[in-house]
Image (spheres, rainbow, N blue to C red):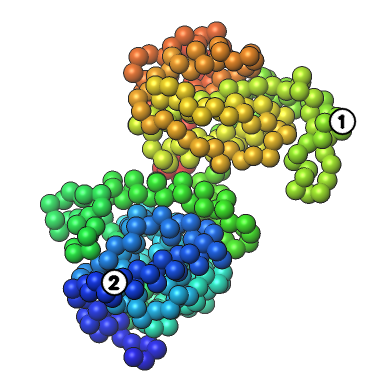
Amino acid sequence: MSNKVNKEIQEKSLLKVSDPKIDKEARERLVGARVSLLLKHAFFGTLATRLILVNSTEWCGTIATDGRHFYYNENFVMLLDTKELEFGFGHEILHVVYDHMGRKGDRHMKIWNIANDYLVNIDLVDHNIGRKITTIEILYDRQYKGMSSEQVYEKLMENVEFIDIDDLLQQMLDEHMEPSDSAEGDGEGDGDGDGKDGKGRPKFTEEEMREIQEDFQSAVINAAQQEADAGNLPGNVKKMIKNLTQPELDWRELLDVSLTSSIKEDTSFMRPSRKGWAMDAIMPGTIPGNQTTALVYIDTSGSISQDMMVNFLSEVQGIMEQFTTYKIRVACFDTEIHNPKIFSSDDISEITEYELGGFGGTRFTQIFDDAKSQDIEPDKIIIFTDMQPWDGFGDGDMYDVLWVNHYDQTTTAPFGTTVFYDRKKEQ
């Protein structure tokens, strides 16, 4: 077979009943490519290994993903070497990382998909993720470097009458999963689709696709932490991660005097700060007696989405970034308290490494029982929640409590101060 073949002809010849012997070798190649990514590009490798491999030779001509599964045509996989398979994994991962489906809006689907493929392939080439696939022609044009998908889309739309759209569609590397795929069925998706066994194209509702994307976002942040060299991450990935972890609330204003007073902390070189270690510098540490303490409780009940949990952690990070002296005890809660951990201004640990736990019902009463059991008198108790408790708000009026309401824009707590979280990017 020549290096470049017509994708339409190729797909027709590759769509067939799976052969167990071919599939075994194809899966071995895919697993090998994922291991190679883990060793060379931890970010991509980590996300690739969380995708479940599904042989979809009967309906998928090349590769595809829904954010949970990696669908592949065994015959197509056999045409590629390890480095090209690495590129293929990277291509699928970036589609989900960049939330291309969620950003579509009312744009023309086919042209939007073309724009996305151009940018994904440029990012992969620029960051040496595997080797650009040449077995089939794929969309690659350097004129779009540095643009967003939206900008490439507008440029394509401006010249749509001069473009052979069908030809460009034939150059798309993968099958793009869309909520509209469920419209051909009964209108209800099944979460993992008819294609779980590879014999039918998966069907998803828009709600299911959103849930998958929210779940993937938290995995993206964790994967980014495992990338030793942040310079290995494409610029668009770094921008996206910043959006996920950028606090929206002004914590200096919200926490008022109780924590702003800690800005004028006393420092001493007798207790050096660990913050200077990464810079080969010795920085003065704070004197413990002058620190202000906050107890932070994160609602991890079943009604809290993964995206909301990411927002909660982003805001705790915001406190750490805006204040030079702090001691924060973070804990999760549902009907019980989970995973308490203390973070301080002299501690280099990251809040994004914090392990969330719980996922049951919602009860506030145990928060204040937990607060009473601590040896410290908190200056502030901060509760991130959707304000949906089972049995009231508990007995916490003796504390200075700040409720951060992420969901219900009308409910306020009977004591303390309630603020409403209205993340701009969710509007």
Quadrant containing the C terminus in the rendered view: top left
Q: Is residue 60 left or right of residue 31?
A: left
In the image, residue 181 lies at what x, y percent? 22, 59
Q: Which residue is mark 1?
A: 270
Residue 395 image offset from top left, x and y in percent: 47, 9
Task: Tell me the quadrant of the picture where the N terminus can be found.
Answer: bottom left
Could you say whether the residue bearing mark 1 is in a helix, strand or loop? strand
> What residue is shown at x 54% (from left), y 59% (from top)?
42
Report the amino acid beneath label 2.
Asp
Residue type marked 1: Met
Q: Which residue occupies the extreme bottom position in the image?
A: 2
Vertical placement of residue 152 versus 207, above or below: below
CB contact under 8 Å: marks 2 and 1: no
Residue wearing tag 2: 23
Q: CA distance from mark 2 to mark 1?
A: 64 Å
- Which quadrant of the figure has residue 303? top left
User: Which image quadrant is residue 20 in?
Assistant: bottom left
The residue lying toward the viewer, choosing from 148 and 354, is 354
